[in-house]
Image (spheres, rainbow, N blue to C red):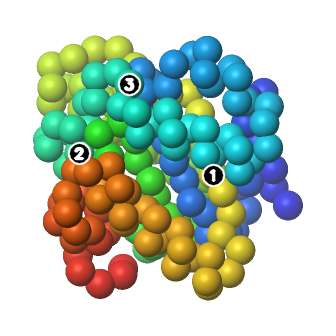
Amino acid sequence: MEWRSRGYLPHYDGDAVQHLVFGLADAAPARAVRNVTNTAPQERHEAFEAMFDVGHGGRILANPRAADIVQRALLYFDAERYCLLGWCVMPTHVHALIEIRASWPMASVMHSWKSFTANAVNQCLGRTGSLWGREYFDRMVRDDDHLEVVRNYIENNPVAAGLVGVQNAWPWSSASLGEPV
């Protein structure tokens, strides 16, 4: 297994299908992050989802231009560096369901997404400063049934948040394509 950590959360970098969640720098208050860092993975994931869903911070990804930049970045290296199985760009965070390839470890994929999108969004919106939170959250998908549960969860996120009435109405999601990718 290929586990790594920068002293915060552990991450798996080997070949696997994973559900990734990463949020804006101002979407999760620092005190709340410290309180859940040492909890069990499922509890940690649920705690961060709850923080992101509250909508703290500037909600930069609610701007269609910013959301489009992030979505295009997710799709850019699909089938080359990873296989993107589902995604959703929410106002405060991003979900990606990807199959990692050994030649492009998770850390490299995440760095590429975060670095490119931070620069592009800041330039597009005429802003400076950090865009993304330091960490991301990954959870391995166990089997085909779990894969479908996770994909549905990701694509239903805008509906659950009250942003749209049906999954395929959210333009920054794999659901907007109609069929699973």
| Residue identifier under label 3 | 56
- Label 3 sits on a secondary structure element that is loop
Task: Look at label 1 and name its amino acid.
Answer: Asp
- Label 2 sits on a secondary structure element that is helix
Residue at horizontal 73%, vertical 36%? 9
Q: Report the quarter where the C terminus lies.
A: bottom left
Depth check: give the residue in front, 84 or 93: 93
Location of residue 56 by image quarter: top left
Q: Which mark is residue 138?
A: 1
Residue at horizontal 61%, vertical 84%? 144
Residue at horizontal 24%, vertical 57%? 172
Location of residue 62 by image quarter: top left
**Vertical side of 179 occupied by 135: above or below:** above
Q: Report the quarter where the N terminus lies.
A: bottom right
Depth check: give the residue in front, 162 or 13: 162
Q: Is residue 84 visible?
A: no
Marks 3 & 2, CB-CB < 8 Å contact: no
Task: Look at label 2 and name its amino acid.
Answer: Ala
Task: Look at label 3 and name its amino acid.
Answer: His
Location of residue 177 by image quarter: bottom left
Q: How far is the residue under mark 3 from the one under mark 2?
A: 17 Å
| For residue 80, side relative to residue 69 (left or right) | right
**Vertical side of 147 occupied by 4: above or below:** above
Q: Which mark is residue 67?
A: 2
